[in-house]
Image: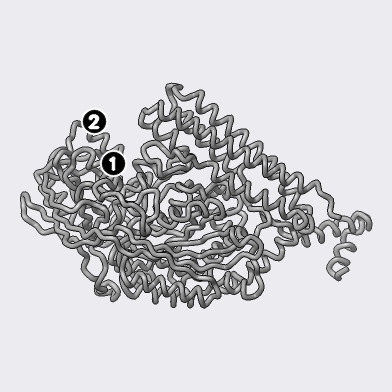
Amino acid sequence: MSPESKRVVSRFSHLGAAAMLLVLANSLAAQEQPQRLMGFTAERAAEQLRWERVMAAVPDTATMREYHYAMTRAPHHAGTEENYRLAVYLRDLWDGFGFETEMVRYDILVPWPVDLRLRLVYPDTVELAVTEPPIPEDPDSYVEGGLPGMAAYVASGRAEGDVIYVNYGRISDYRLLDDMGVSLEGKIVLVRYGGTPGQMRGMKVREAAKRGAAGVVIYSDPEDDGYVRGDIYPNGRWRPWEGIQRGSFLDVPIYPGDPLTPFVPSIPGVERIPFEEAENVQKIPVQPISYGEALKILEHIGGDAVPTEWQGGLPLTYHLGPGPARIEIDVEYDYQERPVWNVFGKVVGAVEPEKFVLAGGHRDSWVLGARDPTSGAVSLLETARGVAAAVAAGFEPRRSIVFGSWGGEDFFLLGSTEWGEQFADELKENMVVYINRESYTSGNWSAGGNHSLEAFVIETSKDAPHPEAPTLFDAWQGQQPGEPLRLDALGSGSDYTVFLDHLGVPSLNVGYESANGIYHSLYDTYHYYQRFGDPGYRYGVAQADMVGRMVMRLANAEVLPFDFTSASAVIAGYVDELMALDEGGLLRDELRAIGAANAAMRVAATETNGVLNRLLTGGSALTDQNRPALDRVNALIMRAEREMIDERGLWRRPWYRNLVYAPGYYEGYAAKTLPGVREPMEDGAWDVARTQAGMLVEALERVTSALTEAGAAGRAASARVIS
């Protein structure tokens, strides 16, 4: 007994020696109690944490800065030699880490601008800028070879018309104009980026075109992304008067990836549809501009003043139009098949090498892309370097770990979508989880994904560091005090889309983030990032640590750490939302059936959790003896998430097959939950909603069956006696 223990006994001798020794023994036992991790026995959890400490000792700010500088020296948009050079750069780094590497090429329809012109033709004639000038304080802004202020996947051609201002171009904005009797036929629509819930720019154009608009001009309003928010670059982080947000206008809720190869990969021998039949390419010309140029249009728009909530941040009263301002758009794009490269680095698993966890992000950008996406790429490189150090020291994950770099994400998910479509059967069989790691900046932690992974992410955050708090968990909880931590639902907007929405592979999108004004602009530079992104790379190192822990645990867990009780609780909340939406009771029986199926899933998940926890409590000797049974359990857990997919797909867009999560048809970025039922309810298509409700009930019943089988397999293993 230590001297301190003796003093404790003496001090409390009036309790009785026996009682005190019991208290002390319990106290010491509690101190020595090994940490439990989801999916691990106590012995394997301790070993896992030791390997994670090896990984966590590696990421450092100097190496991140070195990678970041090297990857932001030249523009590297999709299809360029410089983008290929960066793929080789990553491959060579991963080779040096000791990984198995592979590069995969797709030839995908990618538009590059030939000529972009925009002019105000009435009441004045003014050429409007579609490029950005360099900023003297930022030497990187003088770079040449980047893409101008372009709109990818829109029609080439000339359009002229009176201007109508449509606010954010949300479906609610367009419907308000419809109700007011405002026609867009033959008009040029002026629309601002943004709007909540998260709306992808292509949806703004699709709905304008449906109403007969001849063209669209889009800009970032300073109320959302400029001087109203704070100091503008180079003095602050917000978009300057000349800043233009480029972007893809692909109609992503229809399908992402190569417009000419929906459902199939763009590889040699695959039949490509004619360009004019590509549903997700916009049919009218579009031109992005800065808010400085938008002011030159807005000051000439007449008609009624806009509703109060439509007023933006420029120094004048906004008006609806139409006219008298008149605009001419004249754009030409060169649509060609261009090479898009994905590159992978792999640590081969020791027990189940065919099963793998994939952590990935993209590397292509519109110009230099120091924040989007290179910041995320260099943080992920540090995760990979840390994992490599653990492997070199003796870490042998049960399953394989793969790091991926996608090409063509900015043109909208080109490389990841084609790869997912090409290897769909293998990925559905063997891919455990996809972790998406795109750009980041110092700020709040954000995490979205399948809610069956919610408990796992929260638990892992308790061991991960944070630059300003004891742990990531503490900081995350501090962002929403008094509220339970919850993963956000994912819609689209990054490379998880094909895995989550099309294949049913559970996915996470995690990282630090804060608002900025250089998104998709010339000014997204290394110089900007050193001042306003993550000075010192402290958040990047912390992010590398958290992603490394998730990857290592998912690859090495004896039982995959999914918890479908969390998923069931979230789905129950979604059903309550649909009940409130069904004011007339037209879908009440179907919604009750969904609720009952979800409750049955929760019962099965709870029982299975208990069985598997008891099995893991039995220790590694028991799990080792029952390895075939645990392999069966893990296969069923993986199958459970896949059962949320229905091959018939969602209403209006069969490429999307996940019945729990999808990007909203009118939003593109933001998730619609239980989308097959919710969206037809919102649009009054009640027969469609009933059909989709039946599909959802069947899916939940399939999940319940898989979980019940997993519980039975685990129960049988737990009952076996070690000989």
- The answer to whether residue 439 is above or below residue 482 is below
Q: Position of residue 66 (x, y in %)?
A: 44, 77
Give the distance between the C-alpha atoms of the residues marked 1 and 2, in whole angstroms: 17 Å
The residue that appears at 16% across and 56% down in the rendered structure is: 331
Indicate how the structure is coloured in the image. Answer: one colour
Q: Position of residue 454 (x, y in %)?
A: 57, 49
State the SS at label 1: helix
The residue that appears at 17% across and 57% down in the rendered structure is: 332
The amino acid sitting under disc 2 is Asp
| Placement of the C terminus among the 4 image quadrants | bottom right
Residue identifier under label 2:
179
State the SS at label 2: helix
Of the pair 519 and 110, the residue shown nearer to us: 110
- The answer to whether residue 232 is above or below residue 599 is below
Question: Could you tell me if residue 12 is visible in this image?
Answer: yes
Of the pair 710 and 140, the residue shown nearer to us: 710
Which of the labelled discs sits on residue 309, or is there none? Answer: 1
The residue that appears at 36% across and 49% down in the rendered structure is: 262
Left/right placement of residue 126 relative to residue 542 reads: left
The residue that appears at 67% across and 44% down in the rendered structure is: 710
Of the pair 629 and 411, the residue shown nearer to us: 629
Question: Could you tell me if residue 479 is visible in this image?
Answer: no
Q: Closer to the observer: label 1 or label 2?
A: 2
